[in-house]
Image (cartoon, helix red, strand yellow):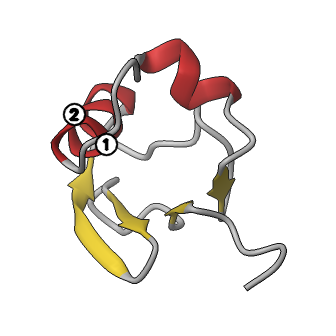
């Protein structure tokens, strides 16, 4: 669908984790950028690092950007 982001990071849950989705597939619960990076690598995305995750236009951050994690 046009305009739909490839990757969606959902708002932080009560425990601080954020669900990570690529297309229609949920990859898991991330508790920081390192987790998001690893999920994307496991999904087959090469060359992904924490800086890429912070700046990529392919990611839709819901409920706060890449620095929004609750303890």
Name the disc covering residue 38, or none.
2
Seen in the image, is 2 located left or right of residue 36?
A: right
**Horizontal side of residue 69 vs 57, given as left or right:** left
On the image, the x and y values in percent for residue 67 come to: 58, 31
Tell me what residue is drawn at x 25 percent, y 43 percent. Answer: 44
Task: Give the x, y percent position of residue 36.
Answer: 34, 40
Mark 1 Cα-neighbour bin, 10 Å: few <14, some 14–19, many ≥20: many
Hey, which quadrant is residue 40 in on the image? top left
Q: Note whether 29 is above or below 47 in the view shown.
A: below
Could you say whether the residue bearing mark 1 is in a helix, strand or loop?
helix
Q: Nearer the viewer, residue 63 or 46?
A: 46
| Residue drawn at x 34%, y 37% as measured from the top left | 45
- Pinpoint residue 66: horizontal percent, then vertical percent: 59, 36
- The residue nearer to you, when weighing 66 against 56, is 56
Task: Please say if 13 is above or below 15.
Answer: below
For label 2, count other residues whose C-alpha is less than 10 Å away and answer few (under 14), some (14-19) or many (20+).
Answer: some
> Which quadrant: the N terminus?
bottom right
Considering every residue shown, the one lying at the far right of the view is 3
Contact between marks 2 and 1 (CB within 8 A): the answer is: yes
Residue 64 on image: x %, y %? 68, 52
Q: Say left or right for 66 vs 30.
A: right
How far apart, in angstroms, are the residues tagged by discs 2 and 1?
A: 5 Å
Which disc, if any, is residue 40?
A: 1
């Amino acid at each position: 669908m046009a305009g739909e982001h490839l990757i969606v990071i959902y708002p932080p849950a009560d425990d601080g984790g954020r669900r990570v989705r690529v297309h229609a597939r949920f990859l898991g619960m991330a508790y920081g950028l390192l987790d998001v990076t690893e999920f994307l690598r496991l999904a087959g995305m090469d060359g992904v690092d924490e800086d890429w995750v912070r700046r990529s236009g392919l990611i839709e951050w819901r409920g706060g950007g890449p620095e929004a994690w609750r303890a």
